[in-house]
Image: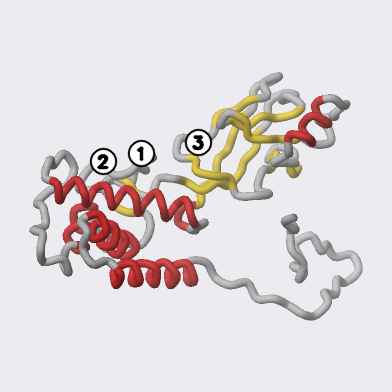
Amino acid sequence: MTISLLDICNRAMDEISSFNPPTYIIGNDDDTAKSLLAAARKVGEELVRDYDWQEMSRTATVTTVNTVSVYDLEDDYERIAPDTMWNGSDFRFMRGHTTKREWAAITNSQVDPAMTYYWRLKGNQIQLEPAANGVFTFSYEYLSRAYCTDSGGTARADGWMADTDLPVLPADLFIHGVRYYFSKAKNLPYGDSEAEYDAVIQSRQGKNTPTQAVNMAAAVVPPGRCNYFNRLNIPDRVDS
């Protein structure tokens, strides 16, 4: 069962006997409640910033407008997943994110939209080159910053807003994180809480997505078969 923001804060206080758990969090002027809320927000922002949790993965679909080259990102956008931008109408990979040097070369040369579109992020928008030649749809995967939802499941792009809000990520991450940051803010001993929080993060990250098996044998493709989806033991990209 998913527990709420209020439950998370109360659970975080279970091992801190010097403070009384507040009866509510949002809108409470009590210093303890405000410190707990600040810690809960800090944990959420930290978790979505530092790791690509599968729970935070979303797919955005954009419909172009003829001759328009700039399109808004999603309201809960945190960062894009590399190499996921596809022209779904023509089933073509869209090349990007391009560097400033590459963009200068592309925009000053002849680019045929019948071949491919290039893209980059600028001013928190997606910019295409060339501009859309007609109407088509493209999609991409991104990581959401909405680490919680309201009680009905609607994403909260701006974080905790009500005591009944629910975490998207496992609740134990928030419980241990709130306990650690609250203890640190109140000048309480926090070494054990920090170690427990780090241990929970590592454990959850290790189990968050299944590990892909690596086939060390060479692939054999029968004549006439397509090997497009064949997995080889080589990286999709090499970071410099």
Q: Is residue 3 above or below residue 106?
A: below
The residue that disc 2 covers is 161
Q: Nearer the viewer, residue 211 or 202?
A: 202
- Whole-percent x and y of residue 82? 65, 49
Where the N terminus falls, by quadrant?
bottom left
User: Please, what is the three-letter code of the amino acid marked with disc 2?
Assistant: Met
Decide if residue 225 is in sight here.
Answer: yes
Q: Nearer the viewer, residue 30 or 200?
A: 30
> CA separation, marks 1 and 2?
8 Å
- Residue shown at the point (72%, 56%) measured from the top left: 239
Left or right of residue 121, residue 46 in this image? left
- Residue shown at the point (52%, 67%) measured from the top left: 209
Left or right of residue 228, residue 27 in this image? left
The residue that disc 3 covers is 74
- Whole-percent x and y of residue 158? 36, 39
Lower position in the chain sequence, tag 2 or tag 3: 3
Asked whether disc 1 touches disc 2, contact meaning CB atoms under 8 Å apart, the reply is: yes
The residue that disc 1 covers is 158
Task: Name the quadrant containing residue 128.
Answer: top right
> CA separation, marks 1 and 3?
13 Å
Asked whether disc 1 touches disc 3, contact meaning CB atoms under 8 Å apart, the reply is: no
User: Please, what is the three-letter code of the amino acid marked with disc 1?
Assistant: Asp
> CA separation, marks 2 and 3?
20 Å
Q: Nearer the viewer, residue 139 or 90?
A: 139
